[in-house]
Image: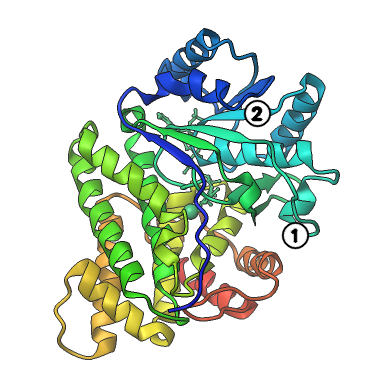
Amino acid sequence: MNNFTYYAPTKVIFGKGTESQAGSLVASQKCKKVLLHYGSGSVKKTGLLGRVKKSLDESGVSYIELGGVVPNPRLSLVREGIALCKKEGVDFILAVGGGSVIDSAKAIGYGVTNDFDVWDIFEKKNSPKNCLPIGVILTIAASGSEMSNSAVITNEDGWKKRGSNSDTCRPKFAIMNPELTMTLPEYQTMCGSTDILMHTMERYFTSNGNMQITDSIAEGLMRTVIENTLILLKNPKDYDARAEIMWAGSLSHNDLTGLGNGGNDFASHRLEHELGGMFDVAHGAGLAAIWGSWARYVYKDCLARFKKFAIKVWNVENSGSDEEIALKGIEAMENFYREIKMPTNLRELGISPTDEQITELAKKCSIATGGKVGSAKVLYEEDMRKIFDAARV
Ligand code: NZQ
Ligand code: ZN
């Protein structure tokens, strides 16, 4: 068991109707002016934005608005938000939406409070010392950004999708009403479950250590997400299944499922970020499309964990060689992706990168990761290229 620090400062308000508390929660932050930040239309269509504004008005909160965040949120809107917040004296951001809106809010919060260019943070040229305080009303269970220390932004100049981690951006509170996720298209629900599973798998597949309690939580979380995702495939309005998945989404990426085991692989994520930057694909679908190729490339270097995954998460029988058992676990995961209509390769994802693009994807990923990534197996640029290439099938 490795030493660890656990920091999860976000206050969680979970359950039906909780968005009505938005006004009082924001008012309790003692801020002067709020930026209400949201996406490309769903919050207007569902009526959520209207309800949130009413709640802010009733609590006497003064706010301005900036909508228009798109999936794979753009740096240009972040810059617009920074200028607006500075001009209007905004000292709190309320993000109403999913990971893209929350991450855009975090980046705006960085830009307002640090005296250097915000993109430097994502290029790792500078570290944020501060961030504006952020509150969240979550509308999709997926990214875990509502409790995480991460933000991921796409710079249209070069189509670079880059992430940054800092405890300063962890939201002050997160309102999570599973009912709000019932308006999601099936594809987004399934992308969300894929991302949630991946956040735990990135921590589970490690060659750096073990901790039984962490493994048990991780395995239980993965089984729960798998079971409830299949329920949502049949009945998207099942409240309990929505709730199980929503809470799993937060626990999967607030560090809980990697404590003490040195688990921090994140290679699939870093590979996907390049796909998202170049081809603007949905994050969860991109992860599903790359995972099988990654897993088959690395499993022999992390055999004990892949075997455990097969047995504990997929109930694979503990007989035959370790390699056979591990491969059955990988197959079971891929079959699950197929069942929930997620892609298992780049063709199914709807993209056909050329050889030159595969080389470029690997090069960009290598630059973004400082030359290497992974704890199940350390990957270098040539490994990244081979995994992208294998995923084309
Ligand atoms: O923009 P609107 O109109 O709201 O539509 C969104 C968007 O098209 C829609 N949507 C969201 N809630 C809805 C809804 N539609 C109907 N009803 C609702 N209740 O869903 C689409 C996807 O939204 P988005 O916010 O992009 O999804 P997600 O939460 O999956 O976020 C993805 C982004 O988060 C990043 C990803 O890379 C990607 O850019 N990540 C952030 C992380 C973090 N900050 O910790 C970690 C993750 O690994 C991930 O990298
Ligand atoms: Zn993710």
Above or below, 58 relative to 286: above
- Residue nearest the viewer, comparing 86 with 304: 86
| Secondary structure at numbered mark 2 | strand
Residue at 43% over, 51% down: 285
Image quarter of the N terminus: bottom left
Q: Label 1 crowding class (10 Å Cα cut-off): few <14, some 14-19, many 20+?
A: some
Question: Circle 2 sits on which residue?
Answer: 92
Relative to 188, 228 lies left or right = left
Q: Label 2 crowding class (10 Å Cα cut-off): few <14, some 14-19, many 20+?
A: many
> Residue lying furthest bottom in this view?
321
Residue at 75% over, 29% down: 80
Relative to 131, 95 lies left or right = left
> Residue lying furthest right in this view?
115
In the rendered structure, are the residues bearing label 2 and label 1 in contact, judged by CB atoms less than 8 Å apart?
no
Beta carbon at label 1 within 8 Å of ligand 1? no
Kindly identify the amino acid type of the residue bearing the numbered disc 1.
Lys
What colouring method underlies this structural image?
rainbow
Is residue 175 at least partly visible in the picture? yes
Query: Alpha-carbon distance for marks 2 and 1?
Result: 25 Å
Is residue 349 at least partly visible in the picture? no
Kindly identify the amino acid type of the residue bearing the numbered disc 2.
Phe
Spot occupied by residue 151 in the image (x, y as percentages of width and height): 61, 48
Relative to 386, 85 lies left or right = right
Question: Circle 1 sits on which residue?
Answer: 124
Spot occupied by residue 374 in the image (x, y as percentages of width and height): 54, 74
Above or below, 231 relative to 310: above
- Residue nearest the viewer, comparing 151 with 58: 58
